[in-house]
Amino acid sequence: MYFSVRQAVILSTLLLPLLSTSASTQSANAANSALPPPVHLTAEQDHQRTMDLLNITTLRPGRSGNPDAPNAANYDESKANPVSDLPDPLILNNGKKVTSPKIWWSQRRPEIVESFDREIYGRVPKNTPKVRWEVTATKHTANGDIPVTTKTLAGHVDNRSYPLITVDIQLELTTPDNVTGPVPVIMEFSFIGPFPRRPGAPAPPPPPPGPTWQQQVLAQRWGYATLVPGSIQADNGAGLTEGIIGLCNKGQPRKLDDWGALRAWAWGASRALDYFETDKAVNAKQVGIEGHSRYGKATLVTMAYDPRFTIAYVSSSGEGGAKLNRRDFGEIVENVAATNEYHWMAGNFLKYAGPLQWKDLPIDAHELIALCAPRPVFIGGGATKGDGWADAQGMFMAAAAATPVYTLLGKKGLDTTIFPPIETPLIDGDLAFRQHSGGHTPAPNWPTFITFASRYLSAPPATKPAQGD
Ligand code: GCU
């Protein structure tokens, strides 16, 4: 039996009230229809709107990954440091020196957080909605020869304040079964789902032979988790009136210091950690976070803002991550301020791509690393050939410049400011670094990260093999 569209509309108008199950559903529907729907802007329109709010008419263009383009990215180290001075993480805004951990915690650190909030990554709203975690499936399998339990989870974000936007965070947790207690867990921001690639970016190299990162983690008797960033916040400017940012703004566009996608993803990681705190299979005091490239940026932001994370592996995070904004090597500030990437940041960030300059940034990436202190952070990247866009040396320099804060807090950062030869791990301190030669991928640095992390994470004893095994 077929209906015309008109007939179907009439039929559904007649049937709907009958199908509605309760008075409360009906009143909720009535309330929803009174709500203004989410605003829809393209990334270009929202970017222009942000520029208008900032009274900016033009931005300087970013660099191109095409070496023949007139604005090709710089890969010449002798030209990479046009700004000689970095802001000093241990000098207060009033010019006084930070002379004790107490002054760091009570005065200087909050000043740095405020600058990152206002100018770079944006502020997380004071009252974000609660998340209700649901285990939607549990599987008992094996990964390699290790028996594991995998839970699929959905984090339902309370949307009663604006029911027109639904956010369900996707998370998967795998823990080994051959253990006698709760395990440390490494969580990855996963590349599952669609995400835009830079035009002309080299394809990621195939994974190296040998165990996957998950198998390497299991071999330590740790668990692993994967979090899907796109289920928290879309990876584009058009999505800023939806996802968790849009939900908190009731579908309206952002203010200039509202959070961008990096802080939204980091917020989602913190909600996953809330769940781990309730799961008896997990030692929630020993949860590490890992991510690569744009998710390397999100990893560093997560670690900087949520002190409950024990350790981080920040891979090829580049501009907007661990790389100094004052560097001219590979990607630069202007790229991240452009329509395809600005949504990672607060609107205010755009002004540093015009009229302001890099030197006008009140803070730089070394201070984001310093916010992680005294906790351990591993910073990795690839060779210039294959991963120059992420600027390993710029990330190393930021780690070196964060070191005085680790020292002040009684820890050991990097003990050198000299960029190490490729594939030389610097893992003796609480800040670690390694450049690999395998292209734009986190894979080659996993074994070194695990060696580093095993100083901080302790697995429970293994179960005794059953008799006869
Ligand atoms: C682009 C972008 C980088 C980002 C990378 C990725 O290349 O310019 O900042 O890190 O995408 O996430 O793969």
Image (cartoon, rainbow, N blue to C red):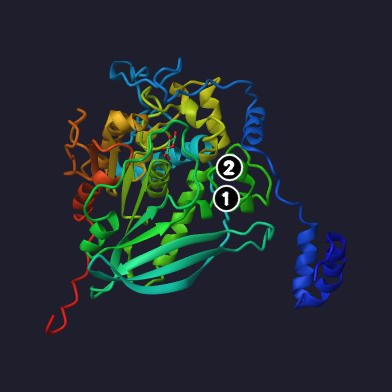
Q: Nearer the viewer, residue 436 or 58?
A: 436
Residue 179 on image: x %, y %: 23, 73
Q: What residue type is labelled 1?
A: Pro
390 horizontally vs 237: left or right: left
Query: Which image quadrant: the C terminus?
Result: bottom left
The residue most toward the bottom is 467
Residue at disc 2, secondary structure: loop
Q: Residue at x 37, y 54 (%)?
A: 188
Question: To which quarter of the image does residue 52 belong?
Answer: top right
Residue 248 on image: x %, y %: 62, 52
Say whether disc 2 or disc 1 marks the residue closer to the N-terminus. 1
Please report contact status of discs 2 and 1: CB closer than 8 Å, yes or no: yes
Label 2 crowd (10 A; few <14 / some 14-19 / many >=20): many
Q: Nearer the viewer, residue 181 or 115?
A: 181
Q: Which residue is drawn at 19% across and 27% down?
A: 418
From mark 2 to mark 1, how far is it between C-alphas? 8 Å
Residue 35 on image: x %, y %: 76, 56
As drawn, 225 above or below 137: above
What residue is pinned by disc 2? Answer: 258
Query: Which image quadrant: the N terminus?
Result: bottom right
Label 1 crowd (10 A; few <14 / some 14-19 / many >=20): few
What residue is pinned by disc 1? Answer: 125
Q: Which amino acid does label 2 sit on?
A: Asp
As drawn, 437 above or below 66: below
As drawn, 104 above or below 185: above
